[in-house]
Image: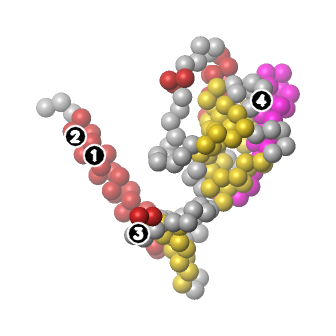
Amino acid sequence: MRRALFATALVAASPGFAASKLPVSKVSKVPVSKVAVSKHEFVALALDEVHTLTFRAPVATVYVGNPTIADVTMIDARHAFVQGKGYGRTNLVALNRDNVQVFNTSITVTGNDSGSTVTLNRGAQRITLNCAGGRCQPTPMPGDDPKAYDSASSQASTHQNTARGLAAAEARPN
């Protein structure tokens, strides 16, 4: 939340904000959709999904009720990214420069409802799989069996770190 407040203050202080300086989503290969939200509508998105909010009036300060459920990154005074960080429901309130509330909405973060996600239940144990492309791969999600979750997360982290190391080594001048 402090990042959102700092980003808002920074954007408000710099009138020449360039579109090329927009923040990049931490989650790659996730489609970013535009959602124009009025004062009384709500935002529903999947875990790790990013949406763009368009405010009808410029805002100076944004608060998220529970930042473990959703995170907001300001793009400029009228646009923001909202990312689903954890399951649940929270709210988002935006104030203008006079500290008057100009926006208030609910944000609901759910699991991925795509047809390629499969949840395998074995008694009390749960494992989430992504079956896109005709092959199912473990996709660790909160609530999965801790042993399967830790194993898949560890393997994914090792793979990403190896790829980053190789990319850094190739980027170094010989």
Q: How is the image coloured?
A: secondary structure
Q: Marks 1 and 2: CB-CB under 8 Å? A: yes
Q: Secondary structure at mark 3?
A: helix
Q: Marks 2 and 4: CB-CB under 8 Å? A: no
**What kind of residue is marked 3?**
Gly
**What kind of residue is marked 2?**
Ala
Q: Give the residue at mark 2.
A: 169
**What kind of residue is marked 1?**
Gly
Please identify the quarter of the rendering in which residue 9 is found: top right
Whether residue 22 is visible to the viewer of this picture, yes or no, is yes
Q: Calculate the distance from the C-alpha at mark 4 to the C-alpha at mark 3.
A: 43 Å
The range drawn in magenta is 87-105
Q: Give the residue at mark 1.
A: 165
Query: Which residue appears at 35% of the width and 52% of the height?
Result: 160
Q: Calculate the distance from the C-alpha at mark 1 to the C-alpha at mark 4.
A: 44 Å
Q: Calculate the distance from the C-alpha at mark 2 to the C-alpha at mark 3.
A: 34 Å
Q: Give the residue at mark 4.
A: 56
Q: Secondary structure at mark 4?
A: loop
Mark 4 vs mark 3: in front: 3
Mark 2 vs mark 4: in front: 4
Front one among 153 and 104: 104
Query: Is 104 colored magenta in this rendering?
Result: yes
Q: Residue furthest bottom?
A: 123
Q: Earlier in the sequence, mark 3 or mark 1?
A: 3
Place of residue 150 in the rendered image (x, y in percent of width and height, measured from the top left):
45, 67
Q: Secondary structure at mark 2?
A: helix
Q: Secondary structure at mark 1?
A: helix
Say if 37 sits above or below 136 in the image: above
